[in-house]
Image (spheres, rainbow, N blue to C red):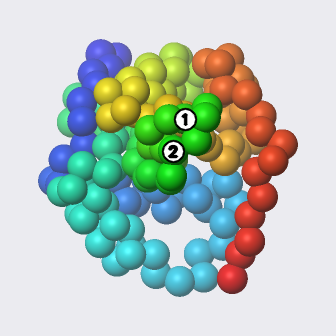
């Protein structure tokens, strides 16, 4: 097994989107709609404008792990004078490749992308499986996070 790491390209999108949908379902989401067109439109647009970046782990020509970082900007505040925030998503490793350090390497790569972009913070809504990865990396819980869903 010779794992290599590279950035996501538009050519990878069909497989990347399938892995994203598998991840969401593994985390408990019900596939009530065809999410593929929305994901495709999002990734094409945000890859093109630089507000989404992803690193992939590949074994030969097989994508075995994904990561994603979306960049947003809020008005600057004292703990984040740029207002730029990285929203981490799409951290997913195929079952046979888990617990081998691949997720940690992908996380390191996308967090570095956020730093280079000028983000003052990176946020994630962690799955139960991911909590240990993120806390080991240095993420801290923020008890002020709230969400309103339509």
Q: Is residue 37 left or right of residue 28?
A: left
Q: Give coordinates of residue 117: x percent, y percent.
A: 33, 35
Q: Report the quarter where the C terminus lies.
A: bottom right
- What is the quadrant of residue 112 in the picture? top left
For disc 1, the marked residue is 80
For disc 2, the marked residue is 76
Q: Residue at x 24, y 65 (%)?
A: 45
Sort mark 2 into few (<14), some (14-19) or many (20+) by Cα contacts within 10 Å: few
Sort mark 1 into few (<14), some (14-19) or many (20+) by Cα contacts within 10 Å: some
Q: Is residue 42 left or right of residue 31?
A: left
SS for dot 1: loop
Q: Residue at x 67, y 54 (%)?
A: 27
Relative to residue 39, is residue 65 depicted above or below? above
Tell which of 4 and 108 is nearer to you: 108
- What is the quadrant of residue 66 in the picture? top left
Q: Taking the image as drawn, is residue 110 in sight? A: no
Relative to residue 121, is residue 138 depicted above or below? above
Q: Give coordinates of residue 7: x percent, y percent.
A: 24, 36
SS for dot 2: loop
Tell which of 89 and 85 is nearer to you: 85
* Marks 2/1: CA–CA distance: 6 Å
Relative to residue 64, is residue 33 depicted above or below? below
Q: Is residue 71 left or right of residue 21?
A: left
Q: Do labels 2 and 1 touch, CB within 8 Å?
A: yes
Q: Residue at x 33, y 50 (%)?
A: 52
Q: Give coordinates of residue 14: x percent, y percent.
A: 27, 61
Q: Taking the image as drawn, is residue 103 in sight? A: yes
């Amino acid at each position: 097994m010779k794992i290599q790491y590279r950035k996501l390209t538009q050519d990878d999108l069909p497989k990347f989107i399938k892995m994203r949908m598998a991840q969401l379902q593994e985390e408990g989401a019900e596939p009530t709609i065809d999410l593929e067109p929305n994901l495709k439109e999002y990734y094409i647009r945000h890859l093109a404008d630089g507000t989404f970046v992803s690193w992939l782990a590949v074994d030969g020509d097989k994508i075995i792990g994904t990561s994603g970082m979306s960049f947003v900007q809020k008005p600057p505040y004292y703990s984040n004078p740029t207002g730029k925030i990285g929203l981490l998503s799409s951290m997913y490793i195929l079952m046979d490749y888990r617990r081998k350090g691949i997720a940690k390497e992908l996380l390191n790569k996308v967090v570095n992308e956020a730093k280079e972009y000028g983000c003052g913070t990176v946020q994630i809504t962690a799955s139960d499986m991911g909590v240990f990865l993120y806390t080991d990396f240095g993420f801290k819980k923020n008890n002020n996070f709230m969400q309103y869903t339509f």
